[in-house]
Image: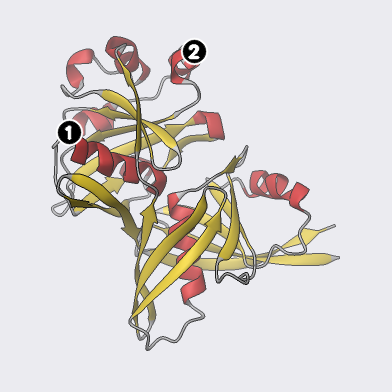
Amino acid sequence: MKKATYHLLDVFTDKKFGGNQLAIFEDATEIPPEMFQNIAQELNLSETVFLFPKNSNGLYPMRIFTPVKELPTAGHPSIGTAYFLAQNFQKKERNITITLAQKIGPIEVKIKMSKKGPLLATMYQVPPSFGRIFENRAEIAQLLNLTISDLMDYPIQEVSCGVPYIIIPVRTIENIQNLTFNIQIWEKLQYVLRDNSIYVFTPEGLLHNGDLHGRMFAPEIGIVEDPATGSANGPLACYLFKYGIKKGPLVSEQGFEMNRPSTIYIEIESEKGIMKNVKVGGQAVFVGKGKFSID
């Protein structure tokens, strides 16, 4: 019986048991592709990566699965996979660039290195797409078991840097901590939400170095709540830039309400008021490894 080796990491944290869990199969060449979804469902992490050897173009092909579907791109799998790959580089190298071949296309990750290994990985996301603005503010407040007065006076808007999110600004940390996601209302609003994930944030941090505090809900992809979402924080950075709410670089907090505190570094590089680069960075910690039986 064949066995495939996978590695477990906690991403967007520098401590075990924080951040977002990730499984990386180091070489998925001999795993039948039709098993990828079943394996991700069996592991039941927010994302599982199936990695392939570097191709002739110098890219590392990878596929990303939640427990219920494949994703075109994602943040913590990109950061975690870059950390994993960086272990094979010379420790004396100060900076490394790794390009991941994802469904959405090539994604560049830059890694700061130390003598002990990677220190920080920064993912460059695709330029933003600003979509619909939602006028049904009372219903969306109800979705979070909040009141309309808890929402900030900025648009509730769909923003995507490869994966679309509905960005919802609320006024206070207390709003974030006290909200609950109402699945019944979510199901009722499917005709307008269209299976998009929800990212709720407030422009203040819980910790002394935090600039933002957020929570992400994605029942449509099998994730009721996610402790750290890089693919949402890119759109969040773009939203903040567009509406002049806060300028980066910024420290975004997530996962605290799940007892998995996460730190995500976000920044927009711009030129003459035009967004040029969407940067999402973080750390990762190796937790363990295992083998999965392949029939």
State left or right for residue 92 relative to residue 208.
right
Residue 206 position, x and y percent, is: 18, 45
**Mark 2 Cα-neighbour bin, 10 Å: few <14, some 14–19, many ≥20:** few
Q: What residue is at 57 percent from the left and 49 percent from the top?
A: 103
Q: Is residue 255 visible?
A: no
User: Mark number for residue 112?
Assistant: none
For the image, the number of numbered tags is 2
Amino acid type, label 1: Tyr
Q: Quadrant of residue 147?
A: top left
Residue 58 position, x and y percent, is: 55, 71
Please identify, in this view, whether the residue under mark 2 or under mark 1 is nearer the observer: 1
| Direction front: furthest residue | 272
Q: Quadrant of the N terminus?
A: bottom right
Residue 282 position, x and y percent, is: 34, 60
Q: Quadrant of residue 109?
A: bottom left
Q: Is residue 253 above or below residue 61?
A: above
Q: What residue is at 16 percent from the left and 31 percent from the top?
A: 172
State left or right for residue 186 relative to residue 57.
left
User: Mark number for residue 243?
Assistant: 1
Q: Which residue is mark 2?
A: 191
Q: Secondary structure at mark 2?
A: helix
Mark found first going from the N terminus, 2 or 1:
2
Q: Is residue 43 above or below residue 85?
A: above
User: Real-space Cα distance between discs 2 and 1?
Assistant: 27 Å
Amino acid type, label 2: Tyr
**Mark 1 Cα-neighbour bin, 10 Å: few <14, some 14–19, many ≥20:** few
Q: Secondary structure at mark 1?
A: loop
Q: What residue is at 42 percent from the left and 32 percent from the top?
A: 217
State left or right for residue 61 relative to residue 274.
right
Q: Quadrant of the C terminus?
A: bottom right
**Nearer to the camera, 111 or 189:** 111
Q: Is residue 115 visible?
A: yes
